[in-house]
Image (spheres, rainbow, N blue to C red):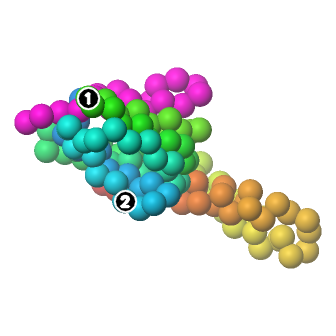
Amino acid sequence: MKTIKVSVVTPDGPVYESDVEMVSTKAKTGELGILPGHVPLVAPLEIGTVRLKKDGKTEFVAVSGGFLEVRSSEVTVLAQSAEKSEEIDVERALKAKERAEQRLNEQKSEHVDFKRAELALRRAVNRINTAEERK
């Protein structure tokens, strides 16, 4: 079966590199599925999960937005942060979710940056969901 090289990178360095059969993720414009031979493309990504089909199995990487670039034989995901599902500390993500929810609830009584707290909540929920997808 044909494959395409995939790299998921962050400012801290590479998170995932492999040849896969298919990449699927959520862009700002909707769900994307990338197969070998896909036309060149650049798309901004939502906070979500990058699903990588390889050898009949699916691997998951949580990303906090970023960009996806497709070239003739390579896909690059540039993300501010990314974690493989098996490396996600679910307990830490649950605590981050609780802190973000608490900030959102307190925002009425204090001057809390609502958008920042909302994004923190979305990132934490995404990490939890990505970790649970592999089970």
- Horizontal side, residue 29 vs residue 59: left or right: right
Q: Report helix, strand or loop for mark 2.
A: strand
> Is residue 94 visible in this depiction of the protein?
no
Residue 27 falls in which quadrant of the image? bottom left
Q: Where is residue 122 in the image (x, y as percent from the top left)?
A: 59, 60
- Horizontal side, residue 36 vs residue 108: left or right: left
Mark 1 Cα-neighbour bin, 10 Å: few <14, some 14–19, many ≥20:
some
Q: Position of residue 11 (x, y in %)?
A: 59, 28
Q: Report helix, strand or loop for mark 1.
A: loop
- Give the residue pinned by disc 2: 31
> Is residue 72 visible in this depiction of the protein?
yes
Closest to the observer, 116 or 88: 116
Numbered range of the magenta stretch: 1-18
Name the kind of residue labelled 1 in the image.
Answer: Ser
Q: Residue furthest right?
A: 110
**As displayed, is residue 20 above or below residue 101?**
above
Tell whether position 47 is magenta: no
**Which residue is found at the position 34% from the left and 54% from the top?**
32
Name the kind of residue labelled 2 in the image.
Answer: Glu
Q: Position of residue 56 (x, y in %)?
A: 13, 44
Q: Which mark is residue 73?
A: 1
- Horizontal side, residue 10 vs residue 110: left or right: left
Closest to the observer, 50 or 135: 50
* Main secondary structure type of the part rendered in magenta: strand
Q: Residue furthest top?
A: 13
In the picture, which quadrant includes the C terminus? bottom left
Residue 106 falls in which quadrant of the image? bottom right
Q: Distance between the residues labelled 2 and 1?
A: 20 Å
Q: Nearer the viewer, mark 2 or mark 1?
A: 1
